[in-house]
Amino acid sequence: MTARRTALITGGAGCLGRAIAVALHDAGHDVIVTYHSSESATRDWINEEAAKGRKFDMYKVDVADFDSCQALVRRLEDDGRQIDILVNNAGITRDASLRKMSAENWAEVMHSNLDSMFNMTQPLCGPMADRGWGRIVNISSVNGSKGAFGQTNYAASKAGIHGFTKSLALELAKKGVTVNTVSPGYLATRMVQAVPEEVLNEKILPQIPLGRLGQPEEIGALVAFICSDAAGFMTGSNIAMNGGQHMY
Ligand code: CAA
């Protein structure tokens, strides 16, 4: 039985953010989600879940921006919210082969996917360590390990996440705070739906031995386990769930 904690999930507007939020809620936690530009999409799903008896709070933040994250942490403190579980889920793609990639698309992905790890985790991990309990889960990708055509920026950022995880896991191991990476494969989400249909059907799906996209809820269940007291011995891990597309 895991005690009731407060969880913060970035990237709450997306399909995966919602599934993780629901899984942590159903594991008995109070759940806060953040959004950046998609306030109404986030509010819509929160209202749908409210009709099913689930309650979520939402806060605005730009995880790519240090000052915005500092302001979020101050607002959380003002509202008396202490964060025990942080799921760094927000991320973007700006796919293009490298020879066609703009410096802007490179930088945007690095800021949103990798700088965000520092921006969100640095202010929240100290209080977790001081209280002697915490869970930090960083969402990477199968493509951080195996690479993907058109994703030099994304794969570099997602590979960087696990280096961050391993170092922070070492720093916090004695403080009761675990830090892990989850590397999902291709999921049935809006991000994957944006991949050109013929690329998805002809190049990607044939590489997945299970022959289907993953469901965001499958990742949500994994994250809920990592955030439980039962997973206290797991730290510095990179847990893959990708339908067999890439085996470690
Ligand atoms: N594998 C091998 N060859 C590929 C390829 C692939 N996956 N994708 C494109 N190509 C080939 C094309 O067939 C074409 O070949 P020819 O020149 O011989 O005709 C060539 O590459 C085209 O190259 P370009 O540089 O002109 O590429 P483009 O401008 O047509 O667009 C792309 C390339 C933007 C990368 C497009 O293919 C694409 O969007 N691919 C999907 C990338 C992808 O997998 N993104 C994942 C998003 S989901 C996600 O990221 C979630 C997660 O964590 C898993």
Image (spheres, grey):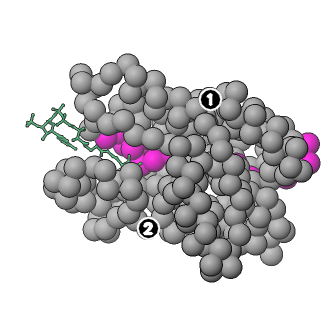
**Residue 115 visible in the picture:** yes
Where is residue 176 drawn, in percent x and y?
Answer: 84, 50
For numbered disc 2, what is the local secondary structure?
A: loop
Image quadrant of ligand 1?
top left
State the residue at coordinates (79%, 58%). 6
User: Is residue 138 covered in magenta?
Assistant: yes
State the residue at coordinates (75%, 32%). 70
Where is residue 83 drawn, in percent x and y?
Answer: 80, 50
- The label number, if any, that marks residue 32 in the structure image: none
- 106 to 35, vertically: above or below: above
Using residue 83 as the reference point, say whether residue 231 is left or right of it. Answer: left
Where is residue 159 drawn, in percent x and y?
Answer: 48, 36
Q: Which amino acid lies under the numbered mark 1 shown in the image of this protein?
A: Asp
Where is residue 149 drawn, in percent x and y?
Answer: 26, 38
State the residue at coordinates (28%, 68%). 211
Quarter location, residue 4: bottom right
Residues in magenta?
130-148
Q: Is residue 77 or residue 131 the one in the foreground?
A: 77
Quarter location, residue 236: top right
Residue at far top of view:
103
- The label number, if any, that marks residue 215 in the structure image: 2
Are discs 2 and 1 less than 8 Å apart at CB?
no
* Mark nearer the viewer, 2 or 1: 1
Q: Earlier in the sequence, mark 2 or mark 1?
A: 1
- Location of mark 1 (residue): 65
